[in-house]
Amino acid sequence: MTKKICIVGVTGLVGANLAKKALSKGYLVNGTARNASDEDKIKYIKNFPNSQNLTLFSANMNNSETFDEALADVDALFICCLIPIYKSTEGIPANQLSEEEGRSKILAPTVEGCLNILHSAKRNKIRNVLICSSTASTNPNIHIEEKNEIDHWSDESTQIKNKKFTSAAKTVMEKRAIKFCEENNIRLCILLPTGLYGELLIPGHLRHNPYAWLDRLLNGGEPRHAICPDDSISMIHTEDLAELFLNAFECDSCEGRFFGVYESLHWEDIYKECERQIPDMITPKYLDTKSAKPTAFDFARRDSLGVKLRDFPTMLSQTLDSLKKYQSKKVK
């Protein structure tokens, strides 16, 4: 029997990739966007292979009832609309807000929006929910040699105290979602990605990093950093993340949090690979020391989902190829 899923945030970076992958596997897909008649975004989604199996709906996470039609008679709900909020509606950076403002303008929209969608899922008797969150919720205050997604949580009080409201929103949202789903007998899987590489599906996704700074490098512009940070960052290919999502749904016994990460690399290693693939790029200034160790992860739960992940040189190459194709189309 063909399964039907609903992807909330279908025009977003994660949602669009998930929709493309699900359609290619024969799923029926309901997709929601704030404005499902916005052809500047929707036209790209409608061009996916098997898009005859895609039905689009307008819905706003400020209003739970707007999701009811899209969630009727679906086998699973994928929440991919909870993108990081880095500024208030007035344009003030999150780290410049007071605690009260950070809670109301950064935390509340994410947490309340997620719960509004979950209330619609409850009304529609959905038993499978999958949420895209972030590794920002997996950074405890103590030093650990290897992170795992069961034991290691960020402390939202510390995040809020340090004005990391964007990260705190993910931590609080996940805890509230877990509580809601436990109380309502809903199987919940949470995927935890960070840097997203892969094919550019919608031009609007160029505003996201790493697409923005890689596109700039290809056009002779500055790198993301003038001085290479002595730090690391994790990443995954968007198609691999979509595969993890679908495998988690198909596995009836899978529940809880899963890293959506290939691995973490030092920024110097990232830039050196960029130099190999973009020989004439402007390079950052490299430090004399490289002391920071990349974050180490326990990937046992991720690997249980059975997805072979692309390495960084491959995901970078495929991202750059996609950006070059987009640039050539613009020239024509």
Image (cartoon, rainbow, N blue to C red):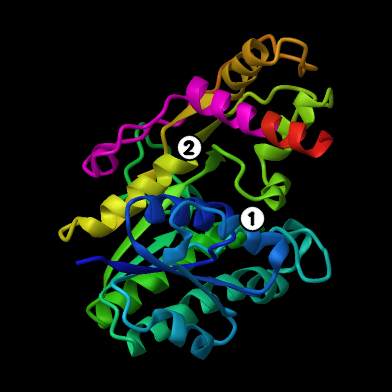
Instruction: Provide the secondary structure element on which disc 2 rests.
Output: strand
Q: In the shown orientation, is residue 161 left or right of residue 70? A: right
For badge 1, the amino acid type reads Asn
Instruction: Provide the secondary structure element on which disc 1 rests.
Output: loop
Q: CA distance from mark 2 to mark 1?
A: 30 Å
Which range of residues does the magenta coloring cover? Answer: 294-323
Number of residues whose C-alpha sits closer than 10 Å to that of mark 1, classed few (under 14), some (14–19) or many (20 or more): few
Give 134 or 35, whichever is nearer the viewer: 35
Please provide percent x and percent y for residue 298: 30, 36
Quarter of the view holding residue 181: bottom left
Please provide percent x and percent y for residue 69: 45, 86
Point out the tag, 2 or 1, that comes first from the N-terminus. 1
Please provide percent x and percent y for residue 129: 33, 69
Give 303 or 237, whichever is nearer the viewer: 237
Q: Is residue 109 above or below residue 224?
A: below
The residue indicated by pointer 2 is 237
Q: Is residue 179 inside the magenta stretch?
A: no
For badge 2, the amino acid type reads His
Q: Count how many numbered circles sit on residues in the image.
A: 2
The residue indicated by pointer 1 is 162
Quarter of the rendering occupied by the C terminus: top right
Quarter of the rendering occupied by the N terminus: bottom left
Q: Residue at x 51, y 61 (%)?
A: 170
Per the rendering, the mark at residue 272 is: none
Q: Residue at x 41, y 33 (%)?
A: 262
Q: Is residue 83 visible?
A: yes
Q: Residue at x 61, y 74 (%)?
A: 109
Q: Is residue 316 above or below residue 19?
A: above
Q: Is residue 169 above or below residue 66?
A: above
Give 201 or 139, whichever is nearer the viewer: 201
